Image (cartoon, coloured by chain):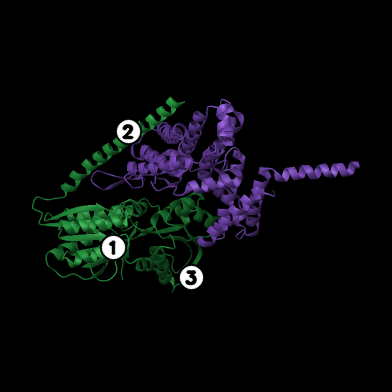
């Protein structure tokens, strides 16, 4: 073999390796969607930074949910309750800040505790009684939605506050709502997007930098083996669902701030979008494989797809069909050649 | 190992027992707190009992409908009103109707969830001589006393005409539609087109299905704003949609140059937005609660009423909101 031949083979090998890495495959799907945007740019609307900033704002809440979902899915589970916990915390946050006038830090803390407790409860049921995550979080999904409707009395908690005599008094939106809703860095990025980035970094630290992350991957890969090698399976799971609940609370507060109200019906079917984003990124639903940056790519893929369909005013019917096509294409890309 | 499993089983048993006890306590508590509230409505001299079957109290519109019924009924000590909520369940609503029939109420007001499955039970009450007022949604056939409803198409048309006048017959409009597989959205759309058909200068530059949802309306409006530098007006099929569009425009710093129009005008939503200057106009989709009590009293007093009553709608703007809105012309 000549030197040239071997070096050519080496390049080929390494390029093959590069193309088959999950990150590259996930980026493939994102690139396809991005090219669609360049092609159908809707009178150059796609070339404006504002379009991308708005897309990032719109996917941030989904993205925050996806962070928690990634942790849970890597551990081999699933969390169906994210959207309901989002609604519960959105309603609670509005109730605390707008109606009750509780100071913002305490309200935020209370919502985080509510979210984390909901998640940890699901985790405890799953870990202690070996109930399937699908069932346990399904129950939490129904319960949290009911709770959201109960605390709000079935009404949206908005700045129109009903008085005891049935009339309405209009109050101002709390500062924190305006802050979360605002744009920073020269109007170039919204605060919700920055919150999403912080959630990504927290998830990355948990998954990559701490021993806890290795526990999650181990449990997702082979729970029994992990148990036998001394991994505290129960607590690891409880913490995973607890973190998911915590992220839901963050997402819920962002949702309330963006709507300027707490809607007990908020986030209907967001859990499915969050799962789709995680899976499109390339995290395996069977657990043990995946990563947080893959989820980021998945979030951007769906986000760009929705944005491109939206700026081109594509009808709802075609949107649904195209979204399905992209999901299938992305997952096939992930699978690659056998 | 065996003890461990046993312990787990025991704990499962204890936990399920605990859950059931909690549940029973919860039901007992809420049950107790509700009942006296129902009886509160009863005047001591109540001559007639009216049964109300509401299909679902989970939506603000229907909560408002019941509130309207209550405020109208409170002025009449001669009637006692019994409220029931079918929680979006057709069969539950059917059995509630059967309960009213066997209790022998003097009149029934029903806002049915679905037409076909509830038609027989409405007819049954009607044939037994209990007058039935059907509110908002229809049943099939003619075995009922009176139907009260609003006309979405007419409301859409009025909104269209109002918009033509407001823009002086010329302008670029964004239409944010409700879930287009539902009749109200279809009628609010076709009525709107009817209303603007003579104004050639009105151009719908962007339309999207926001599924009645505020976050979706905001996303779609962001796209419209990115694409078009000039937008004169947003016509949304409901007030949350108009509010979402406003928030998108506000984030882009363009809300001052755009007129926002919504539909429904509920007290705590559309009317509040108009009052706060967020949207410029909201067209009322009336609940008919007050009208139902008025007609119910007429029927009980032996007067003859029309079989079909179409509710008139009002438009709320900053100028007329304090005086209770302006009635729309036919």
**Mark sitting on residue B118:** 1
Q: Which callout, 1 or 3, points to the residue nearer the camera? A: 1
Q: Can residue A192 be seen?
A: no
Q: Which callout, 1 or 2, points to the residue nearer the camera? A: 2
Check the image and report above or below for A289 versus B248: above
- Is A80 situated left or right of A3 in this image? left
Q: Position of residue A198 (x, y in %)?
A: 55, 36
Label 1 lies in what chain? B
Residue placed most toward the observer, B221 or B100: B100
Q: Can residue B240 be seen?
A: yes
Q: Which residue is mark 3?
A: B201
Residue occupying image coordinates x 11% and y 56%: B78
Q: Which chain identifier belongs to the purple chain?
A: A
- Is A21 situated left or right of A180 in this image? right
**What color is chain B drawn in?**
green
Q: Position of residue B102 (x, y in %)?
A: 17, 57
Earlier-in-chain disc, 1 versus 2? 2
Q: Disc 1 versus disc 3: distance between alpha carbons?
A: 46 Å
Residues beneath discs 1 and 2 located on the same chain: yes
Residue occupying image coordinates x 18% and y 55%: B73
Q: Residues within 10 Å of mark 1 (few under 14, many from 20)?
A: many
Q: Disc 3 versus disc 2: distance between alpha carbons?
A: 68 Å
Q: Residues within 10 Å of mark 3 (few under 14, many from 20)?
A: some
**Mark sitting on residue B18:** 2
- Toward the right, the furthest residue is A2
- Is B52 situated left or right of B186 in this image? left
Mark 1: secondary structure: helix
Q: Quadrant of the N terminus of chain A?
A: top right
Q: Disc 1 versus disc 2: distance between alpha carbons?
A: 39 Å
Residues beneath discs 3 and 2 located on the same chain: yes
Instruction: State which quadrant residue A125 falls in.
Output: top left
């Amino acid at each position: 073999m000549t030197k040239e031949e071997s070096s050519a083979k080496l390049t080929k090998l390494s390029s093959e390796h590069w193309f088959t890495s999950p990150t590259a495959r996930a980026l493939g799907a994102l690139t396809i969607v991005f090219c669609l945007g360049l092609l159908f740019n809707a009178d150059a609307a796609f070339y404006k930074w504002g379009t991308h900033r708005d897309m990032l704002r719109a996917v941030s809440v989904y993205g925050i949910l996806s962070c928690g979902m990634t942790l849970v899915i890597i551990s081999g589970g699933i969390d169906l309750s994210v959207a309901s916990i989002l609604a519960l915390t959105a309603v609670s946050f509005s109730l605390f800040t707008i109606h009750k006038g509780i100071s913002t830090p305490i309200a935020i803390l209370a919502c985080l505790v509510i979210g984390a407790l909901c998640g940890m409860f699901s985790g405890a049921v799953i870990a202690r009684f070996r109930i399937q995550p699908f069932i346990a979080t399904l129950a939490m999904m129904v319960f949290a939605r009911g709770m959201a409707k109960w605390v709000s009395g079935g009404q949206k908690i908005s700045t129109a506050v009903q008085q005891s005599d049935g009339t309405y008094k209009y109050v101002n939106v709390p500062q924190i709502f305006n802050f979360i809703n605002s744009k920073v860095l020269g109007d170039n990025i919204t605060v919700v997007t920055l919150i999403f980035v912080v959630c990504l970094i927290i998830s990355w630290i948990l998954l990559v930098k701490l021993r806890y992350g290795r526990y999650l991957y181990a449990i997702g890969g082979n729970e029994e083996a992990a148990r036998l090698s001394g991994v505290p399976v129960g607590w690891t799971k409880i913490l995973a669902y607890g973190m998911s609940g915590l992220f839901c609370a963050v997402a819920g507060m962002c949702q309330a701030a963006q709507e300027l109200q707490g809607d007990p019906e908020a986030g209907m079917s967001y859990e499915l979008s969050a799962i789709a984003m995680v899976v499109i990124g390339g995290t395996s639903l069977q657990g043990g494989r995946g990563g947080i940056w893959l989820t980021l790519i998945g979030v951007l893929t769906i986000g760009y797809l929705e944005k491109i369909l939206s700026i081109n005013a594509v009808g709802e019917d075609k949107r649904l069909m195209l979204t399905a096509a992209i999901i299938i294409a992305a997952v096939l890309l992930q699978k690659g050649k056998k | 190992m065996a003890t461990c499993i046993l312990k787990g089983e025991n704990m499962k048993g204890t936990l399920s027992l605990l859950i059931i006890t909690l549940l029973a306590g919860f039901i007992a508590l809420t049950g107790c707190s509700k009942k006296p509230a129902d009886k509160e409505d009863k005047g001591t001299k109540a001559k007639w009992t009216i049964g109300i079957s509401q299909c679902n109290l989970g939506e603000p519109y229907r909560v408002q409908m019941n509130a309207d019924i209550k405020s109208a009924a409170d002025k009449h000590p001669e009637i006692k009103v019994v409220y029931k909520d079918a929680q979006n369940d057709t069969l539950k609503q059917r059995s509630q109707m059967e309960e009213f029939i066997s209790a022998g109420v003097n009149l029934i007001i029903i806002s049915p969830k679905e037409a076909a499955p509830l038609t027989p039970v409405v007819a049954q009450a009607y044939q037994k001589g209990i007058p039935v007022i059907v509110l908002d949604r229809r049943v099939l056939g003619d075995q009922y006393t009176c139907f009260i409803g609003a006309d979405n198409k007419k409301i859409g048309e009025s909104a269209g005409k109002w918009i033509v006048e407001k823009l002086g017959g010329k302008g670029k409009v964004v239409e944010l539609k409700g879930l287009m597989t539902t009749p109200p959205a279809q009628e609010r759309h076709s009525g709107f087109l009817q209303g603007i058909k003579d104004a050639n200068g009105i151009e719908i530059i962007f339309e999207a299905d926001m599924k009645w949802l505020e976050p979706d309306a905001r996303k779609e409006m962001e796209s419209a704003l990115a694409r078009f530098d000039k937008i004169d007006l947003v016509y949304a099929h409901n007030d949350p949609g108009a509010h979402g569009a406003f928030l998108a425009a506000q984030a882009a710093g363009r809300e001052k140059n755009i007129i926002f129009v919504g539909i429904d005008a509920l007290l705590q939503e559309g009317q509040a937005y108009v009052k706060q200057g967020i949207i410029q106009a909201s067209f009322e989709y009336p609940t008919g609660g007050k009208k139902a009590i008025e007609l119910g009293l007429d029927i009980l007093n032996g007067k003859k009423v029309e079989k079909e009553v179409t509710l008139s709608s009002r438009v709320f703007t900053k100028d007329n909101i304090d005086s209770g809105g302006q009635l729309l012309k036919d």
